[in-house]
C-alpha cells in the first residue's frame, strides 16, 4: 500500500462470510476436567497420538522437498546452525526464568516471561540504524496471513507461517534446516474469524511446541523437525480454532483456543512436555448449571449470566494468545475474549458475564483463579481483553509497584496491580464513544447512555477492529514508554435482536466501517503508563499496523500496513530508517545476536481480519502478498569487495568499468535476459529502466530475493563489486552500450 492509500475494509457482513461453520472431521474431545479455581488431579486428555499415527497427515521435509516458492534461494546451512539445534536441549525452566539476564537470544514469545519485547542489545542504535541493510530473505511459500514472532536460539530461528506450518532456519543466512506441515484440513478455515494464521512456537528441552488451526497441540524434535507427539485440545465438531503461540511455564505447555462465540466455551489447558498428557484445564466461563459447579469461582460467575439458557451458547471467553508470567509471585496472567453477542435487549439482561473480556491471574501449578479484572462487563462492542499483557515494575506516586499493563481493544490503557488485581489507573488513548472513562475506585467503565441498547444505527469508536488489537506491544524500561499500534475507525453500528444470532456468527451487532480519510487513522503511539498520557505518535496512512520491538539502542521498530518497516527514535519518535517489505506486516519484530553481530527479523505477510475483509487494502502495498521473513543487519564496512560511494561514483564514469559490467552481464545474465536486458515480467518491462536501488538489486542478484520467481541466487559467482558493475552497465542508455533492441520498464524480475 502506498502512503496515500486508505483502509478499505468491507462491511461486517463480509466478515460473516469468513466464519460460516461447517462440519469438521470428528475426533474425540478431551474431557472437561477442570474449571476456574479447580484443583484437578493430572489426567490424560484421551487424544494424544504417537508420531507414527500422525505421520500420515503431517510431513517433515528437507529444503529439497519444500513447497514451490519457499526458501531463500541457494543458501547454505552453516555448520554452526546445525550444531546449534542441539542447544535447544539445554533450554529449561531456569533459562526461561533468566531470559532477562541474557541478551543475545529471543527464547520465549515476548523475549521474557514479562512479555516486554525489549532487547538490551545496542550494537544497532539511533546513531547508526540508517546503515541497516537487508541480510537475507526467506519465503515461506504461503500467501495467507503471517503473524508469528520468531524464537531465536544460538543462531537458529523457529517460526510459523499460514496453515500452522513450522520452520527452522539458519539465523545467519536464512537457509532452511527443516519444516513441518501439520496438514490442517482446508475446511478448518471456515471456523476462523481472521484467516489461517498462527502466532508462533515455544521451545523447551529439545522440543518445539506449536498448535494447528484445527486444535491440535504437537511437539517436534528440535534437531530434525520430526513429530514426537500430538494431542487434540478442542472439540473439533464445534467452531474452535487455535492460533496462539504455546508458552512453557514451570514444565507445563500452555495453550488456549479461539473461535467464534457463540458456540465455544473458552479455556486454558496445561500439558506435559514429554507425553502430551493434559495436567489441568481451566474454563473461563460457566457451563450447564444443571451439571453443578466444579468450583466456587464458576458458581460466582454463573450469577452474572442472566437468562436460563445463556450457557447453551458456549459462553465465549476464549484465551486466544495473551499470557504473561511472574515467577516471584507465581502467577500466570491471561486475557479472555468476549462472550456471546451481549447486545440489544438481551445485553441489558445478561449482567457482567464473568469471566469474559477479563484479565485472569491463575496459579500455574493447578489453574486455580487468584484474581480477575474485567475490562468490559457485558461486552456489547466485541472488546475482548485478549491483547498483549505486559509486566513491569513502575514507580507510581513515589512507590514501586508491580504492575500489569494492557492497551485494551476498548480504547483504554490499563495499569493494574499484578499482585492483587486492583486497578491503579486507566485512561483512553483514542476517542471512546462507548464510555467516558473508568471509575478508579470500582474499576468499571463509565458507559455512555444507550451504547449497547440502541437498535437504530449509531456512530461509534472504537469498532470491532479495536483501538488496538492482537499486534504485539513493547515496553522500554529505559524510556519508561509503551509502544503499540493504535487506530481509530469510525463505525456505523446497529445492535440487533437476539433472534438474529446464529451459532458461529460474530454476534448480533451489525456494523459497517466508514472508510473516508476523515474516519480512519492509524498511528504508532508511545504511551507513558505512569502519567497515563501520550508521549509522542507517528502517524500512518492506514490502520492495522504491526507489532513493535524496542531496544537499548534507543530504537523502536514496527512494520506497517502499507508495506514498510521502520525504525524510530524511542525517546522522540523521529523516524530514522525505513525500507519496503514487499507486503503488509502485523507480526512483532525480534532482534538477536550471532557471532558478535546484531540482527533484526520481521515475519511479513498480510494479516488477520483486516487483510481478509480489506482485500483492496492488501493490493495497495505495492508488493506481492507472499509470506516472507526479512532479516537486517548493519552494512559491512567498506572493503576490497565493497566499493565506497566515491569508488562507485568514479566507476559510473569509467568506460573500462562499464565494459567489465557488460562482460559480467553477458556472462551471467544474458542467458536468461538476452542482450536486450529483458525482464521476466510482463511484455515491455525490462532491466534497464528498473527503479531498484543498489541494495535491492544486489539482494535480487546475490541473495535470492526472487528465487521463487525463477531468478537464481548468483552469490556464489558474483561479488558486491560485480553487481555494482552490472548495475552501472544497465543504467546506461542503449545508444551508449550498442543494445538498440533494449526495452525499458519496471523492476528486475
Image: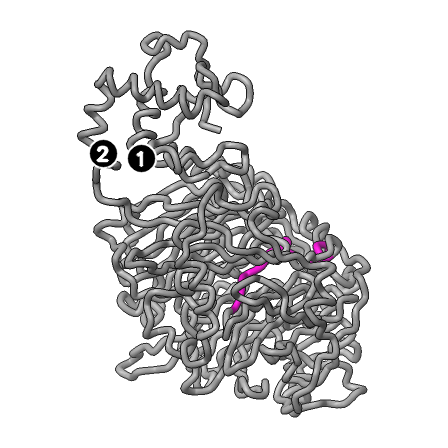
Q: Is residue 597 visible?
A: yes
Q: Which mark is residue 720?
A: 1
Q: Earlier in the sequence, mark 1 or mark 2?
A: 2
Q: Main secondary structure of the magenta part?
A: loop
Scheme by which the image is coloured: one colour
For mark 2, does the 10 Å Cα neighbourhood hold few (<14), some (14 to 19), or many (20 or more) residues?
Answer: some
Q: Quadrant of residue 280?
A: bottom right
Name the residue: 33% across, 71% down. 102
- Residue nearest the viewer, comparing 400 with 584: 584
Q: Is residue 500 magenta?
A: no
Q: Quadrant of residue 695?
A: top left
Name the residue: 54% across, 82% down. 372
Q: Is residue 198 magenta?
A: yes
Give residue 361's position: percent from left, percent from top: 52, 82
Kindly check if marks 1 and 2 are in contact, taking CB atoms under 8 A apart as contact.
Answer: yes
Write down the region rendered in magenta: 188-202
Name the residue: 37% across, 46% down. 135
Is label 2 in a helix, a strand or a loop? loop
Relative to 648, say whether 232 is above or below: below
- Residue nearest the viewer, comparing 159 with 738: 738
Q: Which residue is mark 2?
A: 643
Is label 1 in a helix, a strand or a loop? helix
Amino acid at each position: 500500500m502506498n502512503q496515500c492509500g486508505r483502509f478499505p475494509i468491507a462491511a461486517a457482513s463480509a466478515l460473516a462470510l469468513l466464519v460460516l461453520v461447517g462440519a469438521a472431521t470428528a475426533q474425540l474431545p478431551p474431557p472437561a476436567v477442570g474449571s476456574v479455581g479447580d484443583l484437578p488431579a493430572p489426567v490424560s486428555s484421551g487424544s494424544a497420538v504417537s508420531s507414527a499415527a500422525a505421520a500420515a497427515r503431517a510431513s517433515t521435509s528437507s529444503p529439497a522437498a519444500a513447497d514451490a516458492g519457499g526458501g531463500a534461494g541457494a543458501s547454505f546451512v552453516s555448520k554452526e546452525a546445525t550444531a546449534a539445534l542441539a542447544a535447544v536441549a539445554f533450554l529449561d525452566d531456569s533459562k526461561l526464568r533468566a531470559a532477562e539476564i541474557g541478551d543475545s537470544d529471543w527464547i520465549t514469545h515476548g523475549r521474557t516471561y514479562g512479555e516486554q519485547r525489549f532487547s538490551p542489545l545496542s550494537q544497532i542504535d539511533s546513531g547508526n540504524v540508517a546503515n541497516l541493510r537487508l541480510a537475507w530473505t526467506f519465503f515461506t511459500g504461503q500467501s495467507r496471513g503471517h503473524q508469528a514472532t520468531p524464537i531465536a536460539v544460538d543462531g537458529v530461528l523457529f517460526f510459523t507461517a499460514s496453515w500452522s506450518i513450522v520452520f527452522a532456519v539458519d539465523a545467519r543466512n536464512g537457509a532452511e534446516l527443516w519444516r513441518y506441515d501439520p496438514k490442517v484440513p482446508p475446511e478448518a478455515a471456515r471456523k476462523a474469524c481472521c484467516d489461517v494464521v498462527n502466532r508462533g512456537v515455544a521451545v523447551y528441552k529439545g522440543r518445539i511446541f506449536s498448535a494447528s488451526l484445527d486444535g491440535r497441540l504437537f511437539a517436534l524434535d528440535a534437531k530434525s523437525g520430526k513429530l514426537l507427539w500430538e494431542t487434540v485440545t478442542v472439540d473439533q465438531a464445534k467452531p474452535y480454532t487455535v492460533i496462539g503461540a504455546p508458552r512453557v511455564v514451570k514444565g507445563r505447555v500452555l495453550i488456549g483456543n479461539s473461535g467464534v462465540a457463540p458456540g465455544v466455551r473458552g479455556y486454558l489447558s496445561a500439558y506435559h512436555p514429554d507425553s502430551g498428557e493434559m495436567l489441568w484445564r481451566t474454563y473461563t466461563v460457566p457451563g450447564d448449571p444443571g451439571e453443578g459447579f466444579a468450583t466456587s469461582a464458576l458458581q460466582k460467575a454463573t450469577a452474572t449470566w442472566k437468562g436460563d439458557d445463556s450457557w447453551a451458547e458456549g459462553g465465549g471467553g476464549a484465551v486466544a494468545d495473551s499470557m504473561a508470567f511472574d515467577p516471584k509471585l507465581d502467577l500466570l496472567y491471561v486475557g479472555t475474549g468476549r462472550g456471546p453477542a451481549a447486545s440489544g435487549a438481551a445485553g441489558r439482561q445478561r449482567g457482567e458475564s464473568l469471566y469474559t473480556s477479563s484479565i485472569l491471574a491463575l496459579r500455574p501449578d493447578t489453574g486455580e483463579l487468584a484474581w480477575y479484572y474485567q475490562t468490559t462487563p457485558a461486552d456489547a462492542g466485541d472488546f475482548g481483553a485478549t491483547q498483549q499483557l505486559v509486566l513491569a515494575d513502575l514507580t507510581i506516586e513515589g512507590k514501586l509497584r508491580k504492575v500489569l499493563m494492557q492497551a485494551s481493544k476498548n480504547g483504554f490503557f490499563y495499569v493494574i496491580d499484578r499482585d492483587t488485581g486492583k486497578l491503579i489507573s486507566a485512561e483512553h488513548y483514542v476517542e471512546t464513544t462507548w464510555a467516558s472513562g473508568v471509575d478508579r475506585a470500582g474499576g468499571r467503565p463509565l458507559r455512555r447512555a444507550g451504547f449497547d441498547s440502541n437498535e437504530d444505527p449509531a456512530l461509534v469508536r472504537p469498532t470491532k477492529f479495536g483501538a488496538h488489537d492482537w499486534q504485539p506491544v513493547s515496553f522500554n524500561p529505559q524510556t519508561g514508554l509503551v509502544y503499540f499500534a493504535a487506530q481509530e475507525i469510525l463505525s456505523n453500528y446497529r445492535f440487533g435482536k437476539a433472534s438474529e444470532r446464529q451459532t458461529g456468527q460474530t454476534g448480533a451487532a451489525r456494523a459497517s466501517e466508514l472508510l473516508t480519510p476523515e474516519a480512519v487513522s492509524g498511528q504508532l503511539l508511545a504511551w507513558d503508563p505512569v502519567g497515563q498520557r501520550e508521549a509522542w505518535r507517528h502517524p500512518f496512512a492506514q490502520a492495522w499496523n504491526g507489532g513493535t520491538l524496542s531496544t537499548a539502542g534507543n530504537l523502536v521498530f514496527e512494520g506497517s500496513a502499507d508495506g514498510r518497516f521502520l525504525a524510530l527514535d524511542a525517546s522522540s519518535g523521529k523516524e530514522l530508517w525505513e525500507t519496503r517489505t514487499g507486503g503488509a506486516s502485523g507480526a512483532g519484530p525480534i532482534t538477536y545476536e550471532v557471532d558478535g553481530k546484531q540482527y533484526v527479523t520481521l515475519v511479513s505477510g498480510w494479516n488477520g481480519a483486516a487483510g481478509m475483509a480489506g482485500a483492496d487494502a492488501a493490493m495497495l502495498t505495492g508488493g506481492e502478498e507472499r509470506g516472507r521473513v526479512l532479516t537486517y543487519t548493519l552494512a559491512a564496512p567498506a572493503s576490497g569487495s565493497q566499493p565506497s560511494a566515491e569508488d562507485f561514483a568514479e566507476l559510473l564514469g569509467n568506460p573500462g568499468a562499464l565494459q567489465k559490467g557488460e562482460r559480467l552481464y553477458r556472462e551471467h545474465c544474458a542467458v536468461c535476459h538476452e542482450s536486450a536486458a529483458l525482464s521476466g515480467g510482463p511484455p515491455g518491462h525490462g532491466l534497464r529502466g528498473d527503479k531498484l536501488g543498489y541494495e535491492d538489486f544486489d539482494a535480487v542478484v546475490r541473495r535470492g530475493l526472487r528465487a521463487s520467481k525463477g531468478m537464481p541466487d548468483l552469490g556464489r559467482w558474483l561479488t558486491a563489486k560485480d553487481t555494482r558493475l552490472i548495475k552501472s552497465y544497465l543504467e546506461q542508455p542503449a545508444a551508449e552500450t550498442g543494445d538498440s533492441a533494449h526495452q525499458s520498464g519496471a523492476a528486475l524480475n
